[in-house]
Amino acid sequence: LITPPAVGEKMSEEHFRRYGWTYGPHNNTVTHRYAEAAIQVAKDLDIPYIDMWTAIEKRVQESRKQRPVEPCEDNGYDGYDEFLSDGLHLNAKGNLLLFRTLAGTIERNWPELCPHGRSV
């Protein structure tokens, strides 16, 4: 089971408006509750899960602490653009994070699926 990623709200809203779509309830608070519910389902069923919401949110928060952005350089996306293409969907770096997390989950839970016992 894979949770939804964190949401870059400003990015998502801009993307919707750019295409003339009505902006829906895509916000990080609601998405976080959804991710928590998905994790609970995985725990109830005793199945592995990948918490992409926390994986991205944690990295975004760490990035903010490490490099304060000058106001003239800030695109207003709060660092979510590092992992998301439009505020909702993973970009190349977000997909790489998902791949590495998924490979680690497979290795921990089903080591026999790793080729010749090697880490992915």
Image (tube, rainbow, N blue to C red):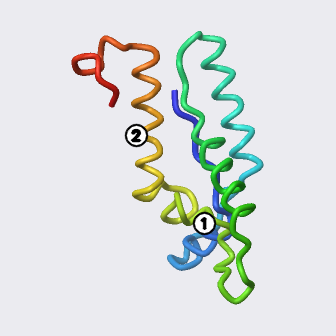
At 69% across and 76% down in the image, what residue appears?
A: 76
Relative depth, front residue between 118 and 73: 118
Q: Nearer the viewer, mark 1 or mark 2?
A: 2
* Disc 1: CA contacts within 10 A as few (<14), some (14-19) or many (>=20): many
| Quadrant of the rendered image containing residue 39 | top right
Question: Three-letter amino acid code at disc 1?
Answer: Ser
Residue closer to the observer: 111 or 85:
111
Amino acid type shown at disc 2: Phe
- Secondary structure at badge 2 equals helix
Residue 46 rendering spot, x and y as whole percentages: 59, 10
- Please name whichever residue, 97 or 65, is drawn nearer the observer in this view of the structure: 65
Q: Relative to 67, is 105 above or below?
A: above
Residue shown at 65%/85% (left/top)?
A: 73
Report how far apart the C-alphas of labels 1 and 2 lie in the structure.
23 Å
Which structural element holds mark 1?
helix
Q: Residue 99 has which mark?
A: 2
Residue 111 point in image, percent of width and height: 36, 14
Q: Residue at x 22, y 17 (%)?
A: 116
Q: Residue furthest bottom?
A: 72
Quadrant for the C terminus, please.
Answer: top left
Where 103 falls versus 72 (above or below)? above
Tally of marks: 2
For disc 2, the neighbor class at 10 Å (few under 14, some 14 to 19, many from 20) is few
Q: Position of residue 16 (x, y in %)?
A: 57, 70
State the mark number for residue 84: none
Dot 1 or dot 2, earlier in sequence: 1
Q: Which residue is mark 1?
A: 12
